[in-house]
Image (spheres, rainbow, N blue to C red):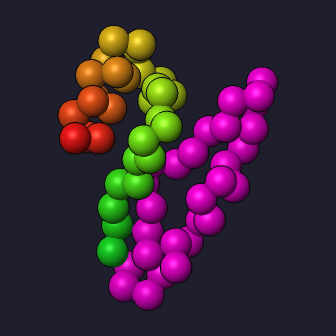
Amino acid sequence: MLDRALGQGPVTANIRVQPLRQCWVETGQRGLCIGGFAQSIVRLGPSDSCYLLRILQT
C-alpha cells in the first residue's frame, strides 16, 4: 500500500499534481512512481522536464 494514494494530489488550474517519490508503508522502501501520462515536472524548465521524463519512462 502506498503512503499516498495515487490520484490524490492537489489540483491547481485543472492540472493534477502528483508526487514522484513514493514510500511503501510495509517495507519503508522508497521509489519513483511516474505514470505514462506525466507531461512535465514542477520546478524544471520545459526542455529539462521533457528530457528527464523521457529517461525515467523508458
Question: Is 35 drawn above or below residue 44 in the view shown?
Answer: below
- Determine the image quadrant of residue 12: top right
- Indicate left or right for 14 with 7 as reference: right
* Residue 25 lies in the magenta-colored region: yes
Residue 56, percent across and down?
A: 26, 40
Question: Is 46 drawn above or below residue 5 in the view shown?
Answer: above
Residue 42, percent across and down?
A: 50, 28
- Indicate left or right for 43 with 53 as reference: right
Residue at 55% across / 71% down in the picture? 3
* Residue 45 lies in the magenta-colored region: no
Residue 35, percent across and down?
A: 44, 46
- Determine the image quadrant of residue 29: bottom left
Label count reads 0
- Determine the image quadrant of residue 28: bottom left
Q: Residue furthest bottom?
A: 26
- Indicate left or right for 5 with 37 as reference: right
Residue at 35% across / 54% down in the picture? 32
Residue 46, percent across and down?
A: 41, 13
Dominant SS type (magenta)? loop
Question: Is 53 drawn above or below residue 44 in the view shown?
Answer: below
> Considering the image in quadrants, where does the C terminus appear?
top left
| Nearer to us in this view, 35 or 47 | 35
Q: What stretch is highlighted in magenta?
A: 1-28
Residue at 57% across / 45% down in the picture? 18
